Image: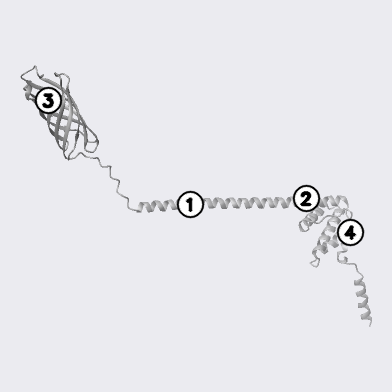
């Protein structure tokens, strides 16, 4: 019976305790017993039974007790820890002295500055990591490009090389050609020897032989044996000429120099200058030395 009575009394007494009985350090702080308040609040913070809200309150009052005891550095450390765990907490200036409120605000600013510094370092490290990754990708791309070039060069070296292009064919003159020609001639030192001439030229490679007929005051005939120099559309020509003018009883020959111009297929323009010495029986009709110039055209039949 006595035991039952004692248990009932204990239950009544426990029920009469305030809700914050486990935070007895708060009550001690409010009474001004800062030393005992510190001890009680430190014990509370070591306990695992406190809720998050109770732990925040205990740390706040511990910091206030430390501040009131003159332990400024320890109070600042607790306030900074509080700023980390409960950054939205505002210290009530009605419950706490202004100096403590100012210390709590400074601790919050210090923690915020440290948080920003940590965030800035994190962003800088992230940026450096991104730059390093970008540089790695650039190096990898350059390595792949060089590898591709090396493989392409090896493949190109392994492929059979095409034969060198043949030089453009030089149009060689036809080995055999037969060309009728017409020309006008002039003997500036003669006695009015101006007229037209006709020739039939047979070409064998660079060599030529022709037969000529001359009209004019004293018709004549003759022939030439010559050679064309070089190739292409403009070719120098050297020849020996023989001439007979029966009406003037003149016979002889000489040398000829000229050009053959071929601007198109089969057509050839003729330019010649000749110097001849003739044996003349009647000098009144013909001179013994003849310097002549001629120009005309020919057409290749073959």
Could you say where residue 178 lies in the image, as x and y percent from the top left? 15, 38
Q: Residue at x 84, y 61 (%)?
A: 41
- Which sits earlier in the primary sequence, circle 3 or circle 4? 4
Q: Residue at x 93, y 75 (%)?
A: 9
Q: Nearer the viewer, residue 28 or 125?
A: 125
| CB within 8 Å, label 1 to label 2 | no
- Which sits earlier in the primary sequence, circle 3 or circle 2? 2
Q: What residue would you read off at disc 2?
A: 109
In terms of secondary structure, where does tag 3 sit?
A: strand
In terms of secondary structure, where does tag 4 sit?
A: helix
Q: What residue would you read off at disc 1?
A: 143
In this view, 71 is above or below 10: above
In terms of secondary structure, where does tag 1 sit?
A: helix
Could you say where residue 217 lies in the image, as x and y percent from the top left? 12, 22
Q: What residue would you read off at disc 4?
A: 29
Q: What residue would you read off at disc 3?
A: 254
């Amino acid at each position: 019976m006595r035991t039952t009575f004692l248990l009932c009394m204990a239950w009544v007494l426990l029920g009469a305790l305030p809700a914050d009985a486990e935070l007895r350090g708060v009550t001690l702080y409010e009474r001004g017993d800062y030393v005992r308040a510190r001890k009680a609040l430190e014990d509370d913070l070591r306990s695992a039974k406190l809720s998050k809200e109770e732990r925040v309150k205990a740390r706040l009052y511990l910091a206030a007790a430390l501040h009131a005891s003159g332990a400024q550095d320890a109070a600042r450390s607790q306030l900074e820890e509080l700023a980390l765990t409960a950054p939205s907490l505002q210290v009530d200036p009605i419950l706490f002295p202004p100096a403590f409120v100012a210390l709590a605000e400074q601790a919050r600013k210090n923690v915020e500055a440290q948080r920003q510094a940590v965030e800035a370092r994190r962003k800088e490290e992230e940026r450096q990591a991104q730059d390093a990754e970008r540089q790695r990708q650039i190096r990898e791309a350059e390595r792949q490009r060089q590898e591709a070039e090396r493989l392409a060069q090896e493949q190109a070296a392994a492929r059979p090389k095409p034969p060198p292009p043949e030089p453009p064919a030089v149009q060689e003159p036809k080995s055999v050609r037969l060309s009728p020609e017409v020309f006008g001639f002039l003997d500036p030192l003669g006695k009015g020897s101006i007229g037209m001439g006709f020739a039939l030229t047979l070409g064998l490679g660079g060599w030529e032989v022709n037969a000529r007929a001359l009209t004019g005051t004293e018709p004549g005939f003759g022939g030439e044996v010559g050679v064309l120099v070089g190739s292409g559309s403009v070719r120098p020509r050297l020849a020996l000429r023989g001439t007979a003018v029966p009406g003037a009883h003149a016979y002889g020959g000489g040398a000829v120099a000229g050009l053959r111009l071929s601007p198109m297929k089969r057509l050839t323009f003729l330019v010649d200058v000749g110097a001849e010495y003739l044996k003349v029986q009647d000098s009144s009709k013909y001179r013994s030395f003849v310097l002549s110039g001629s120009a005309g055209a020919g057409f290749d039949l073959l």
